[in-house]
Amino acid sequence: MILNHRDYRADSHFDAEVVVVGTGAGGAAIGAMLAELGVDVLFVEEGGHHPTSSFNPYLAESMPRLWRDAGTSVILGRSTFLYAEGRCVGGSTVINGAMTYRAPEEVLQSWHAQVRDDSLGPAAMESWFERAEQDISAKLHRDIAVGGDNRIMALGAERAGWHHEKNRRNHIDCVGSNNCILGCVTGAKQSTLVSYMPRALGAGARCLTEVRARRLLIERGRCVGVEGRVVDPRTLKPTGRIRVRAQAVVLACGAVQTPHLLLQHRVARRSGQLGRNFVTHPNVKVLAIYPHEIGGWRGLSQWGQVRQFHEEGIILAENMGPSGAVAAALPFHGRAIWQRMKHYNNMVLSGVLVEDSNTGRIYRGPFDTAVPVYSITQADLRQFLRATRLLCGMHFDMGAERVILPFTRLHELTSADQIALIDESRIKISDLELFTPHLMGSVRLGGDERDSVVNPDHEVWDLPGCYVSDASVFPTAIGVNPQVTIMAMALRAGERLAARVLARRRAA
Protein backbone atom coordinates (compact mmCIF):
# COMPACT_ATOMS: atom_id res chain seq x y z
CA MET A 1 0.00 0.00 0.00
CA ILE A 2 1.35 3.40 -1.02
CA LEU A 3 -0.41 6.55 0.18
CA ASN A 4 0.12 10.18 -0.84
CA HIS A 5 -0.95 13.60 0.44
CA ARG A 6 -4.52 13.18 -0.82
CA ASP A 7 -5.05 10.08 1.33
CA TYR A 8 -4.43 11.58 4.77
CA ARG A 9 -6.69 13.38 7.19
CA ALA A 10 -5.56 16.65 8.75
CA ASP A 11 -4.22 14.62 11.67
CA SER A 12 -3.48 10.96 10.85
CA HIS A 13 -2.18 8.25 13.17
CA PHE A 14 -0.52 4.95 12.26
CA ASP A 15 1.01 2.06 14.18
CA ALA A 16 3.73 -0.39 13.14
CA GLU A 17 6.38 -2.58 14.68
CA VAL A 18 9.10 -0.69 12.79
CA VAL A 19 8.84 2.66 11.01
CA VAL A 20 11.56 3.34 8.42
CA VAL A 21 12.13 6.97 7.44
CA GLY A 22 13.49 6.95 3.89
CA THR A 23 13.29 4.52 0.97
CA GLY A 24 16.76 4.77 -0.56
CA ALA A 25 19.61 2.27 -0.38
CA GLY A 26 19.58 1.92 3.41
CA GLY A 27 15.88 2.34 4.13
CA ALA A 28 14.47 0.10 1.41
CA ALA A 29 17.01 -2.67 2.03
CA ILE A 30 16.44 -2.89 5.78
CA GLY A 31 12.68 -2.44 5.35
CA ALA A 32 12.43 -5.24 2.80
CA MET A 33 14.44 -7.61 5.00
CA LEU A 34 12.27 -6.84 8.04
CA ALA A 35 9.01 -7.21 6.11
CA GLU A 36 10.06 -10.52 4.56
CA LEU A 37 10.93 -11.82 8.03
CA GLY A 38 7.39 -11.05 9.15
CA VAL A 39 7.85 -7.66 10.82
CA ASP A 40 5.11 -5.04 10.39
CA VAL A 41 6.95 -2.25 8.54
CA LEU A 42 5.78 1.23 7.62
CA PHE A 43 7.90 3.54 5.44
CA VAL A 44 7.77 7.34 5.64
CA GLU A 45 9.07 9.03 2.48
CA GLU A 46 9.37 12.79 1.97
CA GLY A 47 9.14 12.60 -1.81
CA GLY A 48 6.51 11.18 -4.10
CA HIS A 49 6.07 7.79 -5.74
CA HIS A 50 7.08 8.13 -9.39
CA PRO A 51 6.91 4.88 -11.39
CA THR A 52 9.24 4.06 -14.26
CA SER A 53 6.58 5.10 -16.78
CA SER A 54 6.80 8.70 -15.52
CA PHE A 55 10.55 9.15 -16.13
CA ASN A 56 11.80 11.29 -19.02
CA PRO A 57 14.93 13.19 -20.11
CA TYR A 58 13.51 16.67 -19.46
CA LEU A 59 15.59 18.33 -16.77
CA ALA A 60 13.09 21.05 -15.82
CA GLU A 61 10.37 18.48 -15.20
CA SER A 62 12.36 15.62 -13.68
CA MET A 63 14.73 17.30 -11.26
CA PRO A 64 12.06 19.06 -9.15
CA ARG A 65 10.24 15.73 -8.80
CA LEU A 66 13.21 13.48 -8.05
CA TRP A 67 16.01 15.64 -6.59
CA ARG A 68 16.03 17.57 -3.34
CA ASP A 69 15.89 21.30 -4.08
CA ALA A 70 15.66 20.42 -7.80
CA GLY A 71 19.39 19.70 -7.78
CA THR A 72 20.49 22.98 -6.20
CA SER A 73 21.39 21.71 -2.71
CA VAL A 74 24.57 23.42 -1.52
CA ILE A 75 27.37 22.56 0.89
CA LEU A 76 28.75 25.72 2.50
CA GLY A 77 32.50 26.20 2.46
CA ARG A 78 35.33 27.75 0.51
CA SER A 79 34.19 26.39 -2.87
CA THR A 80 30.97 26.31 -4.85
CA PHE A 81 29.81 22.83 -3.87
CA LEU A 82 26.54 21.23 -4.99
CA TYR A 83 25.36 17.86 -3.75
CA ALA A 84 22.85 15.34 -5.09
CA GLU A 85 20.15 13.83 -2.92
CA GLY A 86 17.13 11.90 -4.16
CA ARG A 87 13.72 12.91 -2.79
CA CYS A 88 11.34 10.25 -4.04
CA VAL A 89 10.49 6.61 -3.43
CA GLY A 90 13.84 4.96 -4.12
CA GLY A 91 15.81 7.95 -2.89
CA SER A 92 19.22 8.57 -4.43
CA THR A 93 19.26 5.11 -6.04
CA VAL A 94 16.75 6.49 -8.57
CA ILE A 95 19.13 9.27 -9.68
CA ASN A 96 22.57 7.68 -9.31
CA GLY A 97 24.83 6.27 -12.03
CA ALA A 98 24.26 2.58 -11.11
CA MET A 99 27.78 1.95 -9.78
CA THR A 100 28.07 -0.85 -7.23
CA TYR A 101 31.61 -1.03 -5.89
CA ARG A 102 32.12 -2.62 -2.49
CA ALA A 103 33.97 -0.76 0.23
CA PRO A 104 37.62 -1.77 -0.29
CA GLU A 105 39.00 -4.50 1.95
CA GLU A 106 41.43 -2.11 3.65
CA VAL A 107 38.51 0.17 4.57
CA LEU A 108 36.60 -2.73 6.14
CA GLN A 109 39.74 -3.76 8.01
CA SER A 110 40.07 -0.26 9.44
CA TRP A 111 36.39 -0.28 10.48
CA HIS A 112 36.90 -3.62 12.17
CA ALA A 113 39.88 -2.24 14.07
CA GLN A 114 38.10 0.98 15.06
CA VAL A 115 34.77 -0.54 16.08
CA ARG A 116 36.18 -3.79 17.45
CA ASP A 117 33.29 -5.80 16.03
CA ASP A 118 34.12 -8.95 14.06
CA SER A 119 30.94 -8.65 11.98
CA LEU A 120 32.39 -5.59 10.21
CA GLY A 121 35.52 -7.35 8.96
CA PRO A 122 35.96 -8.27 5.28
CA ALA A 123 35.21 -11.97 5.81
CA ALA A 124 32.04 -11.35 7.81
CA MET A 125 30.76 -8.68 5.39
CA GLU A 126 31.29 -10.92 2.35
CA SER A 127 27.90 -12.64 2.63
CA TRP A 128 26.07 -9.33 3.07
CA PHE A 129 27.74 -7.87 -0.01
CA GLU A 130 26.87 -10.98 -2.01
CA ARG A 131 23.26 -10.79 -0.90
CA ALA A 132 22.92 -7.09 -1.71
CA GLU A 133 24.54 -7.57 -5.11
CA GLN A 134 22.20 -10.43 -5.93
CA ASP A 135 19.18 -8.41 -4.82
CA ILE A 136 19.95 -5.55 -7.23
CA SER A 137 21.70 -7.50 -10.03
CA ALA A 138 25.04 -5.83 -9.34
CA LYS A 139 27.84 -7.34 -11.37
CA LEU A 140 30.09 -6.95 -14.39
CA HIS A 141 27.77 -7.01 -17.38
CA ARG A 142 28.36 -7.85 -21.03
CA ASP A 143 29.65 -5.02 -23.21
CA ILE A 144 26.28 -3.86 -24.46
CA ALA A 145 25.09 -0.29 -24.92
CA VAL A 146 28.66 1.03 -24.79
CA GLY A 147 28.75 4.65 -25.94
CA GLY A 148 31.31 6.67 -27.83
CA ASP A 149 32.37 8.55 -24.71
CA ASN A 150 32.91 5.24 -22.92
CA ARG A 151 35.25 4.10 -25.68
CA ILE A 152 37.14 7.41 -25.75
CA MET A 153 37.96 7.05 -22.05
CA ALA A 154 38.95 3.39 -22.38
CA LEU A 155 41.14 3.98 -25.43
CA GLY A 156 42.61 7.15 -23.96
CA ALA A 157 43.56 5.29 -20.80
CA GLU A 158 45.11 2.48 -22.81
CA ARG A 159 47.15 4.94 -24.86
CA ALA A 160 48.35 6.67 -21.67
CA GLY A 161 49.26 3.34 -20.08
CA TRP A 162 46.66 3.68 -17.31
CA HIS A 163 44.72 0.85 -15.72
CA HIS A 164 41.07 1.11 -16.80
CA GLU A 165 38.38 -1.25 -15.56
CA LYS A 166 34.71 -1.75 -16.32
CA ASN A 167 32.24 -0.76 -13.64
CA ARG A 168 30.13 -3.18 -11.67
CA ARG A 169 26.60 -1.92 -12.29
CA ASN A 170 23.12 -2.78 -11.04
CA HIS A 171 20.90 -3.21 -14.06
CA ILE A 172 19.09 -5.83 -16.09
CA ASP A 173 19.20 -5.51 -19.89
CA CYS A 174 20.34 -1.88 -20.01
CA VAL A 175 19.76 -0.36 -23.46
CA GLY A 176 21.92 2.72 -22.90
CA SER A 177 19.29 5.44 -22.67
CA ASN A 178 21.79 7.44 -20.55
CA ASN A 179 19.02 8.87 -18.40
CA CYS A 180 20.29 7.47 -15.08
CA ILE A 181 20.30 10.79 -13.24
CA LEU A 182 16.67 11.54 -14.15
CA GLY A 183 15.28 8.06 -13.51
CA CYS A 184 15.80 4.99 -15.71
CA VAL A 185 13.16 5.20 -18.44
CA THR A 186 13.19 1.44 -19.07
CA GLY A 187 13.40 0.20 -15.48
CA ALA A 188 16.66 -1.59 -16.25
CA LYS A 189 18.54 0.09 -13.42
CA GLN A 190 17.69 -1.84 -10.28
CA SER A 191 17.12 1.10 -7.98
CA THR A 192 15.27 0.36 -4.78
CA LEU A 193 12.15 1.69 -6.52
CA VAL A 194 12.06 -1.48 -8.64
CA SER A 195 13.97 -3.92 -6.40
CA TYR A 196 13.64 -3.69 -2.63
CA MET A 197 10.49 -1.56 -2.39
CA PRO A 198 8.26 -3.95 -4.41
CA ARG A 199 9.55 -6.82 -2.27
CA ALA A 200 8.78 -4.93 0.94
CA LEU A 201 5.31 -3.94 -0.22
CA GLY A 202 4.65 -7.48 -1.43
CA ALA A 203 5.49 -8.73 2.06
CA GLY A 204 2.91 -6.42 3.61
CA ALA A 205 4.83 -3.20 4.26
CA ARG A 206 3.07 0.14 3.89
CA CYS A 207 4.52 3.39 2.51
CA LEU A 208 3.45 6.94 3.37
CA THR A 209 4.75 9.31 0.70
CA GLU A 210 4.92 13.12 0.63
CA VAL A 211 5.52 13.22 4.39
CA ARG A 212 8.55 15.05 5.81
CA ALA A 213 9.64 13.68 9.19
CA ARG A 214 9.91 16.59 11.61
CA ARG A 215 10.68 15.09 15.00
CA LEU A 216 11.01 11.85 16.91
CA LEU A 217 8.50 10.77 19.53
CA ILE A 218 10.36 10.05 22.76
CA GLU A 219 8.85 8.67 25.96
CA ARG A 220 10.88 7.95 29.11
CA GLY A 221 14.11 8.18 27.19
CA ARG A 222 13.04 5.74 24.46
CA CYS A 223 12.19 6.49 20.83
CA VAL A 224 8.62 5.30 20.20
CA GLY A 225 7.75 6.88 16.87
CA VAL A 226 8.01 9.78 14.49
CA GLU A 227 5.93 12.82 13.63
CA GLY A 228 5.83 14.32 10.16
CA ARG A 229 4.26 17.00 8.07
CA VAL A 230 2.27 16.20 4.92
CA VAL A 231 3.33 18.39 1.99
CA ASP A 232 1.42 18.97 -1.26
CA PRO A 233 4.12 18.48 -3.94
CA ARG A 234 2.51 21.03 -6.27
CA THR A 235 2.21 23.92 -3.83
CA LEU A 236 4.84 22.78 -1.27
CA LYS A 237 2.36 23.80 1.42
CA PRO A 238 1.70 21.64 4.50
CA THR A 239 -1.69 19.95 4.43
CA GLY A 240 -1.65 17.82 7.57
CA ARG A 241 0.25 15.98 10.26
CA ILE A 242 1.24 12.32 10.53
CA ARG A 243 2.13 10.47 13.73
CA VAL A 244 3.51 6.93 13.63
CA ARG A 245 4.08 4.90 16.78
CA ALA A 246 6.44 1.93 16.61
CA GLN A 247 8.69 -0.32 18.67
CA ALA A 248 11.66 0.86 16.64
CA VAL A 249 12.38 3.84 14.40
CA VAL A 250 14.94 3.47 11.60
CA LEU A 251 16.31 6.71 10.17
CA ALA A 252 17.50 6.28 6.59
CA CYS A 253 17.39 9.88 5.40
CA GLY A 254 21.01 10.20 4.28
CA ALA A 255 24.11 11.84 5.73
CA VAL A 256 22.57 15.32 5.68
CA GLN A 257 18.94 14.80 6.70
CA THR A 258 19.46 12.05 9.32
CA PRO A 259 21.74 14.15 11.58
CA HIS A 260 19.50 17.16 10.95
CA LEU A 261 16.56 15.23 12.40
CA LEU A 262 18.57 13.90 15.35
CA LEU A 263 20.18 17.23 16.25
CA GLN A 264 16.99 18.66 17.72
CA HIS A 265 16.90 15.84 20.28
CA ARG A 266 20.35 16.35 21.84
CA VAL A 267 21.60 12.80 21.43
CA ALA A 268 25.20 11.54 21.47
CA ARG A 269 26.02 13.99 24.27
CA ARG A 270 28.93 11.91 25.59
CA SER A 271 30.79 11.95 22.28
CA GLY A 272 29.61 15.23 20.80
CA GLN A 273 30.04 13.55 17.41
CA LEU A 274 26.53 13.96 15.99
CA GLY A 275 26.76 15.83 12.69
CA ARG A 276 30.56 15.69 12.66
CA ASN A 277 32.92 13.49 10.56
CA PHE A 278 30.94 14.46 7.44
CA VAL A 279 32.78 13.34 4.30
CA THR A 280 31.83 13.95 0.70
CA HIS A 281 34.09 12.23 -1.87
CA PRO A 282 34.14 15.49 -3.89
CA ASN A 283 34.45 15.56 -7.65
CA VAL A 284 34.79 17.99 -10.54
CA LYS A 285 33.77 17.74 -14.19
CA VAL A 286 36.06 18.13 -17.20
CA LEU A 287 34.29 18.46 -20.56
CA ALA A 288 36.08 17.75 -23.84
CA ILE A 289 34.77 18.78 -27.27
CA TYR A 290 35.98 16.73 -30.24
CA PRO A 291 35.96 17.62 -33.97
CA HIS A 292 33.84 14.57 -34.78
CA GLU A 293 30.63 13.07 -33.47
CA ILE A 294 30.95 11.02 -30.28
CA GLY A 295 27.28 10.42 -29.47
CA GLY A 296 27.97 10.23 -25.75
CA TRP A 297 24.28 10.63 -24.99
CA ARG A 298 23.80 7.12 -26.38
CA GLY A 299 25.06 4.30 -24.21
CA LEU A 300 25.90 3.77 -20.55
CA SER A 301 26.40 6.88 -18.49
CA GLN A 302 29.41 5.34 -16.75
CA TRP A 303 30.90 2.21 -18.30
CA GLY A 304 34.31 2.26 -16.68
CA GLN A 305 36.81 4.05 -14.48
CA VAL A 306 40.53 4.79 -14.61
CA ARG A 307 41.89 3.12 -11.48
CA GLN A 308 45.57 3.83 -12.13
CA PHE A 309 45.66 6.42 -9.35
CA HIS A 310 43.13 4.94 -6.93
CA GLU A 311 45.71 4.20 -4.23
CA GLU A 312 46.60 7.89 -4.37
CA GLY A 313 42.94 8.80 -3.82
CA ILE A 314 42.05 9.70 -7.42
CA ILE A 315 39.51 8.13 -9.78
CA LEU A 316 38.91 9.29 -13.36
CA ALA A 317 35.72 8.42 -15.23
CA GLU A 318 33.36 9.41 -18.02
CA ASN A 319 29.97 10.67 -16.91
CA MET A 320 27.84 11.89 -19.82
CA GLY A 321 24.28 12.92 -19.11
CA PRO A 322 21.19 14.54 -20.65
CA SER A 323 21.82 17.80 -22.50
CA GLY A 324 20.16 19.96 -19.86
CA ALA A 325 22.42 18.60 -17.14
CA VAL A 326 25.52 19.15 -19.28
CA ALA A 327 24.48 22.73 -20.07
CA ALA A 328 23.89 23.44 -16.39
CA ALA A 329 27.44 22.29 -15.61
CA LEU A 330 29.11 24.71 -18.04
CA PRO A 331 30.92 27.70 -16.48
CA PHE A 332 29.35 30.11 -18.98
CA HIS A 333 26.24 32.22 -19.47
CA GLY A 334 23.87 33.04 -22.32
CA ARG A 335 25.28 32.86 -25.83
CA ALA A 336 28.51 31.24 -24.65
CA ILE A 337 26.53 28.21 -23.43
CA TRP A 338 24.66 27.96 -26.75
CA GLN A 339 27.95 28.12 -28.68
CA ARG A 340 29.28 25.11 -26.75
CA MET A 341 26.04 23.12 -26.64
CA LYS A 342 25.86 23.19 -30.44
CA HIS A 343 28.57 20.55 -30.16
CA TYR A 344 26.71 18.32 -27.71
CA ASN A 345 27.07 15.32 -30.04
CA ASN A 346 30.84 15.84 -29.97
CA MET A 347 31.22 16.05 -26.19
CA VAL A 348 32.79 13.74 -23.65
CA LEU A 349 31.98 14.64 -20.05
CA SER A 350 34.55 13.19 -17.67
CA GLY A 351 35.04 13.49 -13.96
CA VAL A 352 37.67 13.53 -11.25
CA LEU A 353 36.85 12.01 -7.85
CA VAL A 354 39.20 12.70 -4.95
CA GLU A 355 39.13 10.86 -1.63
CA ASP A 356 38.56 13.23 1.30
CA SER A 357 41.39 14.37 3.54
CA ASN A 358 39.10 16.62 5.58
CA THR A 359 35.77 16.32 7.38
CA GLY A 360 32.82 18.67 7.69
CA ARG A 361 29.79 19.10 9.86
CA ILE A 362 25.98 19.19 9.62
CA TYR A 363 24.13 21.96 11.46
CA ARG A 364 20.46 22.72 11.99
CA GLY A 365 19.53 25.92 10.21
CA PRO A 366 16.43 28.11 10.28
CA PHE A 367 13.08 27.03 8.86
CA ASP A 368 13.76 23.31 9.40
CA THR A 369 16.76 23.31 7.06
CA ALA A 370 19.92 21.24 7.23
CA VAL A 371 23.17 23.15 6.74
CA PRO A 372 26.15 21.03 5.62
CA VAL A 373 29.54 22.74 5.96
CA TYR A 374 32.69 21.33 4.37
CA SER A 375 35.84 22.54 2.61
CA ILE A 376 38.53 20.65 0.78
CA THR A 377 42.16 21.05 1.86
CA GLN A 378 45.19 22.35 -0.01
CA ALA A 379 46.27 18.73 -0.43
CA ASP A 380 42.91 17.95 -2.05
CA LEU A 381 43.29 20.97 -4.33
CA ARG A 382 46.66 19.68 -5.53
CA GLN A 383 45.03 16.31 -6.26
CA PHE A 384 42.28 17.97 -8.29
CA LEU A 385 44.76 20.06 -10.27
CA ARG A 386 46.94 17.05 -10.99
CA ALA A 387 43.99 14.90 -12.08
CA THR A 388 42.61 17.69 -14.25
CA ARG A 389 45.98 17.99 -16.00
CA LEU A 390 45.97 14.24 -16.60
CA LEU A 391 42.47 14.30 -18.11
CA CYS A 392 43.27 17.30 -20.29
CA GLY A 393 46.38 15.58 -21.60
CA MET A 394 44.43 12.42 -22.37
CA HIS A 395 41.66 14.27 -24.21
CA PHE A 396 44.05 16.33 -26.33
CA ASP A 397 46.04 13.18 -27.11
CA MET A 398 42.77 11.59 -28.30
CA GLY A 399 42.12 14.55 -30.62
CA ALA A 400 39.92 16.91 -28.59
CA GLU A 401 39.71 20.48 -29.93
CA ARG A 402 39.03 22.10 -26.56
CA VAL A 403 38.58 21.18 -22.92
CA ILE A 404 36.28 23.05 -20.53
CA LEU A 405 37.59 23.21 -16.97
CA PRO A 406 35.91 23.25 -13.53
CA PHE A 407 37.57 26.50 -12.45
CA THR A 408 36.02 29.94 -12.12
CA ARG A 409 39.17 31.77 -13.23
CA LEU A 410 40.28 29.44 -16.05
CA HIS A 411 37.42 28.16 -18.17
CA GLU A 412 38.85 26.58 -21.31
CA LEU A 413 41.92 25.18 -23.01
CA THR A 414 42.31 24.78 -26.77
CA SER A 415 45.57 22.84 -27.00
CA ALA A 416 47.85 20.60 -24.99
CA ASP A 417 50.37 23.44 -24.83
CA GLN A 418 47.95 25.36 -22.60
CA ILE A 419 47.76 22.68 -19.89
CA ALA A 420 50.56 24.52 -18.08
CA LEU A 421 48.07 27.36 -17.50
CA ILE A 422 46.39 25.20 -14.85
CA ASP A 423 49.45 25.68 -12.64
CA GLU A 424 50.31 29.18 -13.84
CA SER A 425 46.82 30.50 -13.04
CA ARG A 426 47.31 29.85 -9.33
CA ILE A 427 43.95 28.19 -8.89
CA LYS A 428 42.62 28.51 -5.33
CA ILE A 429 40.18 26.34 -3.41
CA SER A 430 37.53 29.01 -3.93
CA ASP A 431 37.97 28.68 -7.72
CA LEU A 432 36.78 25.06 -7.85
CA GLU A 433 33.25 24.09 -8.82
CA LEU A 434 32.64 20.89 -6.86
CA PHE A 435 29.85 18.33 -6.90
CA THR A 436 29.08 15.12 -5.03
CA PRO A 437 26.42 12.43 -4.80
CA HIS A 438 28.43 10.57 -2.11
CA LEU A 439 27.67 11.92 1.37
CA MET A 440 28.84 9.89 4.37
CA GLY A 441 29.90 9.74 7.99
CA SER A 442 27.87 12.28 10.00
CA VAL A 443 26.29 9.75 12.43
CA ARG A 444 29.36 7.63 12.98
CA LEU A 445 29.08 3.98 14.02
CA GLY A 446 31.51 2.84 16.68
CA GLY A 447 32.26 0.50 19.54
CA ASP A 448 32.48 3.21 22.21
CA GLU A 449 29.84 5.76 23.16
CA ARG A 450 32.61 8.31 23.76
CA ASP A 451 33.61 8.62 20.09
CA SER A 452 30.55 7.61 18.05
CA VAL A 453 26.79 8.13 17.71
CA VAL A 454 25.43 4.64 17.01
CA ASN A 455 26.54 1.26 18.31
CA PRO A 456 27.45 -1.80 16.18
CA ASP A 457 23.73 -2.67 15.98
CA HIS A 458 23.10 0.79 14.41
CA GLU A 459 21.15 1.91 17.50
CA VAL A 460 21.78 5.44 18.81
CA TRP A 461 23.79 4.98 22.00
CA ASP A 462 21.66 7.17 24.27
CA LEU A 463 18.30 6.84 22.50
CA PRO A 464 17.07 3.23 22.65
CA GLY A 465 14.66 2.30 19.89
CA CYS A 466 16.22 4.68 17.35
CA TYR A 467 18.36 3.11 14.61
CA VAL A 468 20.22 4.53 11.61
CA SER A 469 20.58 2.79 8.25
CA ASP A 470 22.31 4.97 5.68
CA ALA A 471 25.80 6.20 4.73
CA SER A 472 25.90 8.54 7.72
CA VAL A 473 26.97 5.57 9.90
CA PHE A 474 30.17 4.93 7.90
CA PRO A 475 33.12 5.33 10.31
CA THR A 476 35.23 6.74 7.45
CA ALA A 477 34.96 7.60 3.78
CA ILE A 478 35.19 4.57 1.52
CA GLY A 479 36.64 6.09 -1.66
CA VAL A 480 34.10 4.46 -4.01
CA ASN A 481 30.42 4.76 -4.88
CA PRO A 482 28.63 3.85 -1.63
CA GLN A 483 25.24 2.36 -2.51
CA VAL A 484 26.07 -1.35 -2.30
CA THR A 485 27.98 -0.83 0.97
CA ILE A 486 24.95 1.01 2.38
CA MET A 487 22.75 -1.94 1.40
CA ALA A 488 25.11 -4.54 2.84
CA MET A 489 25.30 -2.65 6.14
CA ALA A 490 21.50 -2.27 6.14
CA LEU A 491 20.95 -6.01 5.67
CA ARG A 492 23.39 -6.75 8.49
CA ALA A 493 21.55 -4.31 10.78
CA GLY A 494 18.16 -5.60 9.64
CA GLU A 495 18.89 -9.15 10.71
CA ARG A 496 19.79 -7.96 14.20
CA LEU A 497 16.77 -5.66 14.51
CA ALA A 498 14.36 -8.33 13.26
CA ALA A 499 15.59 -10.74 15.92
CA ARG A 500 14.82 -8.17 18.62
CA VAL A 501 11.37 -7.27 17.30
CA LEU A 502 10.28 -10.87 16.78
CA ALA A 503 11.60 -11.90 20.20
CA ARG A 504 9.58 -9.11 21.78
CA ARG A 505 6.48 -10.24 19.89
CA ARG A 506 6.92 -13.81 21.11
CA ALA A 507 7.38 -12.63 24.68
CA ALA A 508 4.23 -10.47 24.61
Image: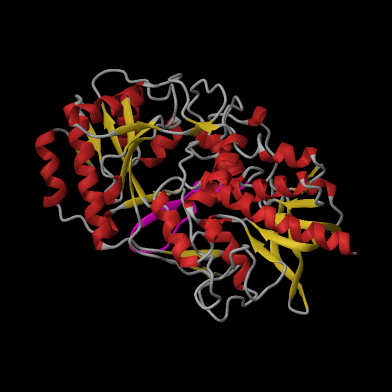
**Quadrant holding the N terminus:** top right
> In which quadrant of the rendered image does the C terminus lie?
bottom right
Residue found at x 85% / y 57%? 14
Q: What stretch is highlighted in magenta?
A: 71-87
Report the side of 180 relative to 187 (left or right).
left
Asked if residue 397 is positioned above or below residue 474 in the image, the reply reads above
Closer to us: 77 or 468:
468
Question: Left or right: where does residue 118 sit relative to residue 409?
Answer: right
Residue 241 shows in this picture:
no
Q: Where is residue 202 in the image (x, y as percent from the top left)?
A: 79, 37
Q: Which of 312 and 360 is in front in this view?
A: 312
Q: Residue furthest bottom?
A: 270
Residue 138: x, y in percent? 53, 34
Position in image of residue 101 (x %, y %): 45, 41
Residue 207 in percent (x, y) is at 76, 47
Please say which color scheme the image uses: secondary structure
Decide if residue 116 is in sight here: yes
Q: Tell me which corner region of the image, top left, top right, bottom left or bottom right, holds residue 300.
A: top left
Residue beneath the point at 18% across and 31% down: 160
Residue at image location 56% in from the left, 76% down from the top: 449
Please give the count of numbered marks on the rendered protein. Answer: 0
Q: Which residue lies furthest to the left in this view?
A: 417
- The dominant secondary structure in magenta is loop
Q: Is residue 417 magenta?
A: no
The answer to if 77 sits in the magenta stretch is yes
Picture layout, residue 63 above or below residue 256: above
Nearer to the camera, 211 or 224 = 224
Horizontally, is 237 left or right of 303 in the view? right
Q: Is residue 450 above or below residue 310?
A: below
